[in-house]
Image (cartoon, rainbow, N blue to C red):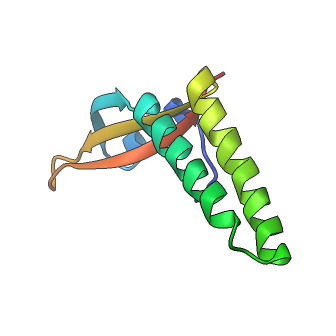
């Protein structure tokens, strides 16, 4: 789930360069923050049954999950659905996490 993320403008510029045009942009950050919160709860529950090595990896993963959840909750990170259109084929939707500047 780790990925290089960019700004909305970077994604739109890449889409435009490839011949696509945006149809809609929907901010689903609140829903995404709830997902990351639920994921953290599950991880905490599962960690009780792990050995020391696996538990250490789980704690590191939880730290990253917490950073993503907090970024979504405080507005430092946005999770967007971008619908793009190519006149030569059918439309599609891609999910874009975006850092706010």
Residue 54 higher or lower than 68, as above or below: below
User: Considering depth in this image, is 57 or 27 the residue closer to the camera?
Assistant: 57
Q: Is residue 3 left or right of residue 50?
A: left
Q: Position of residue 30 (x, y in %)?
A: 44, 29
Of residues 26 and 47, the one drawn nearer to the viewer in this rendering: 47
Asked whether the viewer can see residue 14, the reply is no
Expressed as whole percent of the image width and height from the top left, the position of residue 100 reads 61, 25
Is 13 or 54 nearer to us in this picture? 54
Give me the residue at 84% from left, 76% from top: 53
Q: Is residue 62 left or right of residue 24?
A: right
Please name whichever residue, 58 or 101, is drawn nearer the observer in this view of the structure.
Answer: 58
**Quadrant in which residue 89 is drawn:** bottom left
Image coordinates of residue 86 in percent, x first then y, are 22, 47
Residue 48 visible to the viewer: yes
| Residue drawn at 68 percent across, 42 percent down | 66
Taking the spot 70% from the left edge, 66% from the top edge, the residue there is 48
């Amino acid at each position: 789930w780790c990925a290089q993320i960019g700004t909305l403008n970077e994604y739109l510029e890449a889409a435009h360069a490839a011949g696509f045009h945006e149809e809609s942009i929907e901010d689903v950050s609140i829903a995404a923050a709830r997902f990351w919160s639920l994921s953290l709860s599950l991880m905490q529950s599962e960690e009780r049954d792990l050995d020391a090595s696996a538990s250490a990896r789980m704690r590191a993963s939880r730290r990253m999950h917490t950073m993503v959840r907090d970024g979504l909750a405080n507005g430092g990170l946005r999770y967007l659905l971008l619908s793009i259109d190519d006149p030569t084929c059918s439309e599609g939707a891609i999910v874009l996490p975006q850092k706010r500047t």
